[in-house]
Image (spheres, coloured by chain):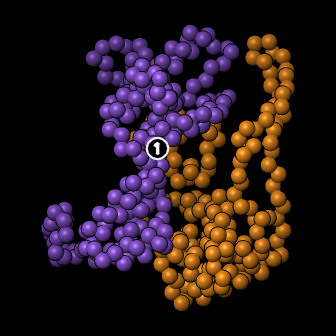
């Protein structure tokens, strides 16, 4: 059994012992650097970065900590992490359905999410800005971009639909997406029902 | 675009923007291998890498070493170097016999439509704003047979098992 490196290894070793397996050897620095660089930026490390890490005379822990700090400071970190949030908020560059009109400036919201991760924005502020940025700080373009979250969904208005009905449909979509994104619960039920007793969804 | 998703991302589990996705599904299916090997997007990236590497290196072996360093982060073994050299040579010979047309990029489109309320037909010319300053990827027609040959080697390395993660 390998000497535990971190406290997690002790648990892993005990379980491996129980089922009669021995742990795989430690990954070398090149492999470790590739893993962490793909994880945090989605990109492979450059040959220069591999050489620098492989030749770093510091201890493994200390050298690795420096790598993590460098990757967290990289602009590509925000680009990689934004993907998760944009999946949750249904990001698209067009409005969906039959017409699927271009949303030529949707990228401003995408870039806002990237910046938020890169600036290490606190989550409470991130949430507030997206729900009510225009109310909180109407003079701040960043706050106005943030509320684009509310209209990321597929919306379509055709000349055949009564505008008031369409507006209600869009508001239902906003309510539902706030529920799905922040409360892990669809709120389509709110279209017809009011009150805490509503447990149905979809 | 919502209605026309990039098939490359689609096959690698990009969720549809129709509904919120809290966690992408993971899958290992044959179309992923076909796409990564045969998609135009893959080959264009291979061409870009081959061109950049050829500008940065002087010898053929040097170029292959550099491709290994940039993709896999290590030097090739002797056997790998030989296999890649042979593949480069064979592919250069093959590409010498192929001809590629330059694609024409549209700056505007003719639109025909029907006014929803009156039923009247109308047409207009829509300038494509995005095409104005669009910089296209390097295309096969921009490269020599030797450059396209090295791109074939790059393509093989993009598809190497060293990019797989077993979880």
Q: Residue at x 68, y 67 (%)?
A: B47
The quarter of the image holding the C terminus of chain A is top left
Residue B73 seen from this side: yes
A131 or A121: nearer the viewer:
A121
Chain under callout 1: A
The chain assigned the colour orange in the figure is B
Residue found 42% across the figure and 23% down from its top: A137
Q: How many marks?
A: 1
Residue B9, position as x, y percentages in the image? 56, 51
Above or below, B142 against B85 in this view is: above
Give the color of chain A as drawn. purple
Q: Residue at x 60, y 83 (%)?
A: B62
- Give how far across and how far down residue A174 sits, in percent: 46, 23
Vertically, is B65 above or below A36? below
Corner quadrant of residue A97: top right
User: Is residue A80 visible to the viewer in this orientation of the structure?
Assistant: no
- Give the residue at mark 1: A114
Question: Residue A160 lies in what quarter of the image?
Answer: top right
Whether residue A96 sits left or right of residue A46 in the image: it is: right
Q: Is residue B164 left or right of residue B45?
A: left
């Amino acid at each position: 059994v390998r000497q535990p490196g971190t406290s997690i290894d002790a648990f892993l070793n005990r379980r491996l012992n129980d089922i009669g397996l021995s742990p795989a050897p430690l990954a070398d620095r090149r492999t470790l650097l590739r893993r962490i660089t793909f994880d945090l930026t989605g990109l492979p490390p450059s040959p220069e970065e591999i050489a620098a890490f492989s030749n770093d005379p510091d201890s493994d822990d200390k050298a690795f900590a420096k790598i993590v700090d460098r990757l967290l400071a990289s602009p590509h970190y925000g680009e990689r992490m934004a993907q998760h949030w944009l999946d949750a908020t249904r990001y698209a560059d067009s409005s969906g359905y039959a017409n699927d009109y271009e949303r030529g400036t949707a990228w401003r919201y995408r870039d806002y999410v990237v910046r938020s991760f890169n600036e290490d924005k606190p989550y409470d502020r991130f949430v507030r800005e997206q729900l009510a940025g225009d109310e909180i700080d109407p003079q701040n373009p960043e706050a106005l971009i943030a509320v684009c979250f509310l209209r990321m969904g597929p919306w379509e208005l055709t000349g055949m639909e009564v505008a008031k009905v369409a507006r209600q449909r869009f508001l239902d979509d906003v309510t539902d997406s706030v529920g799905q994104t922040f409360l892990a619960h669809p709120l389509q039920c709110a279209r017809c029902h009011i009150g805490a007793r509503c447990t149905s969804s979809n | 675009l919502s209605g026309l998703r990039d098939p490359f991302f689609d096959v690698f589990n990009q969720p549809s923007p129709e509904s919120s996705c809290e966690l992408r599904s993971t899958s290992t299916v044959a179309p992923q291998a076909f796409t990564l090997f045969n998609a135009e997007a893959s080959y264009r990236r291979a061409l870009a890498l081959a061109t950049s590497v050829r500008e940065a290196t002087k010898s053929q072996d040097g170029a292959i070493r550099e491709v290994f360093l940039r993709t896999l982060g290590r030097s090739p073994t002797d056997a790998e170097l030989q296999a890649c050299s042979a593949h480069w040579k064979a592919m250069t010979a093959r590409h010498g016999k192929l001809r590629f047309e330059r694609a024409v990029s549209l700056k505007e489109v003719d639109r025909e439509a029907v006014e929803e309320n009156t039923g009247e037909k109308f047409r207009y010319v829509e300038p494509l704003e995005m095409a104005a300053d669009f910089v296209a990827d390097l295309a096969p027609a921009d490269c020599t047979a030797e450059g396209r040959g090295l791109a074939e080697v790059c393509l093989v390395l993009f598809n190497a098992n060293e990019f797989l993660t077993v979880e």
